[in-house]
Amino acid sequence: MTSNTPQRGPTTPMTAIRSTLLSRAAPSIPSASQLYEPLVKNVLRHRLYQIFGHSALFCWALTTLWMTWSSGGMFGMGLKESLLLPFRPSTVVFSGATFLAGALPLVVLRKTHLVAAPTPATSPSRLLSGAFQKRSTTQALLTYLVSSLALLGLHILFTGAYDSSAPAHARLTLFVKSRKHPYYLNGHLLYILISQITVAFACLLRCVLLDRFAVRWANTLMSKGETKVQSFGLARIVTVCLTTLVYTSLVTVAHLTIFAVARSVILPLLYRLPLVHLVLRPFTAHFLRGAWTVSLLTRHWSLVSRAFYLAVTTVAVWEYAESAFDAIVAEPIVVAHQTADPGLTLVSGITSTESYLKHFAYAELRDFAAANSPAASARRTALFSDQKYSPSMWATLSRESLLTLGRDYQLLLRRGKPAPPAAAASVVHSKPTVPLPVPATPLVRTSVYKPAPTSPIRAALDTFSSDGPLAAAVSETAEAGVSHIPELFRSVMPASPQHRAQQAVETVKKAEENVVALVKETKSKWRSGLGNALNAYLPRGIMQTAIQITSWWTRERVHRVAETSLPNRYVDALAAEALCRLTCSSLTEDKFGVVQRDIPKIIEALLSFLTALEEYQAELNASYTLPPPDKLKELSSKEIAEKETLAMEAARAGEVLSVVSDDEAANPVQKAEGLVTEALNGLVKTGALQKSNQMDLECLLNPAVEREVFEEISEQEIFEAVQEAACGEDQGDEEQTEVFEAPPTRLEALQAAAVLSRFTASLNSPAARKLEDILAGFTRQ
């Protein structure tokens, strides 16, 4: 039997239609550590080698100078020997050793602890006390001490190995050459050793008070087209030499004072201590022979001059290395042109978490926005039109710049003080829920299975265990008994372990507070007692000098307060100028109007910042301006000197504020006006605007037509006049008594209709709308 049903072939599997439209999320902008920072760090690495080279050349020149002098000078050696001396192996070796011992540790120290913003301190005392709390100060002290002692070792080695004509007493050994007292310490060595230690501490103090770990950013505000004073090597050498001579002279005077006090006061006091003199006598007994007098300086003048020359060499090597470091690390860096997308590189750079690298990114972004070449215009257009990243490049740029300006604006309003702690969030107590009237079914929390029978011995042991039935019954009985005890007797009951721990913590806190209060009270008593004793026994002139020095040491500087209020003023100026230039360039280069939505935010941020700066400047002018000459005559010389000092500090504070607000240092508003004018001039050159159609900002905001005085006519009167004119035209006024005049032409009528249309556009009334309809119908005829 055959079937009429057709046979089916093999079934074809169903597959989805593939599509090339994929919903991929836009990538984010690469971080600065991936794109911008490696390029900048590569340039900084080469600049570090440049600093090493400059310092090594200076050490080579200084070593050659000292070798020439120790050999009798150019005339004593001869011209040929003087020319060959710098290239001798011994000169090169000692130059390299001087560089390794003196310049290299200081450069590595500065590189390790480099910071972009200055220390927020308003007086020398606060600056020094803040330095003691930093780890960099301890490392700097160790670096200065090790470097100074290493240079002393090189000096001893140089004197013993190279200067064969030196006398025997000039060769610094640890012990004096004496058969009777072989362990007496060499006084010459101790004198030079104390001199080098004094130089190390003095240079550390100078480094802290000058805040040398902070970068000087003066050159970053200058664009490529502006002229700037180059830091020549000869000028740097002259400055270093003058600074070294003056500072080393002051340090030498301080060292002589310290050595005299140690020789005549401290050492005799140590010999009066029990058991101490037994330890010191085999090594220092010869120092007690004779009294310390000024004549000792003339008798040992060669030793004093030798220590002075070694101190000059030490300070010169350090000062030149640090000055070269200060000049080179603040020079602008240009790396964006090395990448395929310079705009993306710069936007990534301004998001860096390192303030030092962010300065370079904003400086290059300012030049990127100010460039006038067609290629630069195309790069800015690509930045504005970016849609490949989420958020876009312009959104990231504007957000980071406004956040930077906003943080520094808030710091300026607080005058450099830290932000107050955030208020604790109030705890919202939830309303108690009303229980349902339905009774809840109790849950069975015990086992539902029948427990296995246990042995009698096991049951007895469980009864007496710590968590057994007997212990539970005892604890419940004790709690019930305590609940019935009066409150009067509960205070004498033993507390719980948790309560005891809390009481112990409170006791320790109270003890700490008492100790702190006792220390403060003791300090105040010692200071008051010492002040009274000094006032009673010291001359009045010395006390007044001490009071002036104390006032100078602790008084707040007006310009330091301004610097603390604007620690990142250079990056603020760069960010404001970059935003202004990019916003003005967007008038012709932003095809999609991406920048327009952020213009109100940018203007608001810049104007708020500028207003705060102007208020601060007005406050300085009102508080520290010198009084008129007639009032100055009424003041004493001391008060006049204080007024002049405050006025000078206020002027320096104004210079700090002018970095952001002045014409010479990127005034945002005035530069924006100039950039708008440049953009309009560029439109004229391209033919988009005509020169005769240009107008200034005043004419644009306040047209001359709006400033004319019109006769006040109500809308009703205008409507009635127009209606009467229309009715008279339709019906024809045969009783017209006026002299016949020629009717206006069609062109004149259309012009009048246009004038009326512009007039009614500013009115908001039904009559005006009706008049617009009539005029629209008339113009279409």
Image: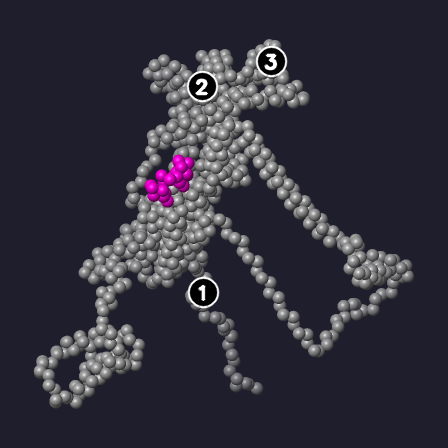
In this rendering, the answer to whether 38 lies above or below 490 is above
Type of residue at label 1? Answer: Ser
Q: Is residue 586 left or right of residue 295?
A: left
- Label 1 and label 2: CA atoms lie apart by 81 Å
Which quarter of the rendered picture does the C terminus lie within? bottom left
Name the N-terminal-most of marks 2 and 3: 3
Residue 305: image tag:
2
Q: Nearer the viewer, mark 2 or mark 3?
A: 2
| Residue annotated with mark 1 | 23
Instruction: Tell which of 475 and 452 is nearer to you.
Output: 475
- Label 2 and label 3: CA atoms lie apart by 27 Å
Type of residue at label 2? Answer: Ser
SS assignment at label 1: loop
At a point 27% along the width and 74% down the height, the residue shown is 761
Cβ atoms at labels 2 and 3 below 8 Å apart: no
Q: Position of residue 198 (x, y in %)?
A: 50, 27
Residue 182: image tag:
3
Which quarter of the rendered picture does the N terminus lie within? bottom right
Q: Position of residue 687 (x, y in %)?
A: 21, 59
Q: Is residue 276 left or right of residue 127?
A: right
In this rendering, the answer to whether 419 lies above or below 724 is above
Cβ atoms at labels 1 and 3 below 8 Å apart: no
Check disc 2: other Cα within 10 Å, few if <14, some if 14-19, many if 20+: few
At a point 49% along the width and 30% down the height, the residue shown is 540
In this rendering, the answer to whether 163 lies above or below 680 is above
Q: Which residues are magenta?
A: 625-646
Type of residue at label 3? Answer: Pro
Name the N-terminal-most of marks 1 and 3: 1
